[in-house]
């Protein structure tokens, strides 16, 4: 098991891609603490689902927009575990709408959760990872950062910011053997994408060269690779996992 004896933090871990990442890391032996905001039922469901997994799993409630809470959570885990090996930033929200009708609250919530939350947890784990001279951070971006649709001004901006943060932080932390990469999923079968998938119907599948919607587990497998020692020479990259959608055409 690639993560036996290692520890991990996953934000947005109670649902979607984050949930799949928690399950994958726990199945490979990691101690995993996942952060959820308000859906306690989903968090408890995941804990029950993974109670027999090789790795230990725990749920921690926090709003990723709270930097102080991020530091408290990470410091507490570090005091107990004496190491933080992996961080996967998966927490995110969607508040789509045309710019002319977008409210300041819609803009702030998406930017502060998606980009701000990623910053907060990167900020919190940087010191312990640098001290240990090891660690891997995986940020969840989106193909929308480069190929945005109408009504995605706030979402695209947040994910574009994550790409820039990933590359810049990778340069800062590389001398301490801490790697930072991102994954840019395309259309994945999650609650967040349900509305878009419902509107687009089968048309979206026609636009994807592989002719299907991706599964959260397929993103989790890439995240686990990037977090593992198998990717020891990989940093500062944004890996598209989109079934070929970003290639364009039909």
Image (spheres, rainbow, N blue to C red):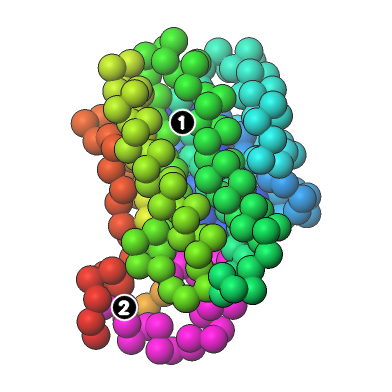
- Name the residue at 46% across, 67% down: 188
User: CA gap, disc 1 to disc 2?
Assistant: 31 Å
Q: Is residue 108 shown above or below 205? A: above
Label 2 sits on residue: 208
Q: Choose top left, top right, bottom left or bottom right for residue 120.
A: top right
Q: Is residue 173 left or right of residue 38?
A: left
- Give the residue pinned by disc 1: 86
Q: Nearer the viewer, residue 195 or 27?
A: 195
Q: Is residue 181 above or below residue 196?
A: above
Which residue shows up at 56% across the image and 84% down it?
198
Farthest bottom residue in view:
202
Where are the magenta residues, as a range?
187-209
* Label 1 or label 2, whichever comes before in sequence order: 1
Give percent across and percent down for residue 24: 47, 46
Residue 136 position in % (x across, y down)? 39, 30
- Asked if residue 174 is positioned above or below residue 93 in the image, the reply reads above
Callout 2: SS: loop
């Amino acid at each position: 098991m690639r993560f036996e004896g290692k520890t991990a933090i996953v934000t947005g871990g109670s649902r979607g891609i984050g949930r799949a990442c928690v399950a994958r890391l726990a199945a490979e032996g990691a101690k995993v603490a996942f952060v959820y905001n308000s859906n306690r039922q989903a968090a408890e469901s995941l804990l029950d689902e993974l109670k027999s997994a090789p790795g230990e799993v725990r749920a921690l409630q926090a709003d990723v927009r709270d930097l102080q809470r991020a530091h408290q959570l990470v410091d507490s885990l570090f005091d107990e575990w004496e190491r933080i090996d992996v961080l996967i930033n998966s927490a995110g929200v969607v508040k789509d709408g045309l710019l002319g009708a977008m409210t300041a609250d819609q803009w702030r919530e998406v930017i502060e959760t998606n980009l701000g939350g990623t910053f907060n947890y990167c900020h919190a784990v940087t010191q312990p990872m640098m001290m240990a001279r090891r660690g891997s951070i995986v940020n969840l971006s989106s193909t929308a950062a480069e190929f945005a649709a109408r009504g995605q001004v706030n979402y695209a901006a947040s994910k574009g910011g994550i790409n820039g943060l990933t590359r810049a932080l990778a340069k800062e932390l590389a001398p301490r053997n801490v790697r930072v990469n991102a994954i840019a999923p395309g259309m994945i079968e999650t609650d967040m994408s349900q509305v878009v998938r419902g509107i687009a119907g089968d048309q979206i599948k026609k636009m994807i060269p592989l002719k299907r919607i991706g599964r959260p587990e397929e993103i989790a497998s890439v995240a686990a690779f990037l977090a593992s020692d198998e990717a020891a020479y990989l940093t500062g990259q944004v890996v598209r996992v989109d079934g070929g959608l970003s290639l364009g055409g039909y």
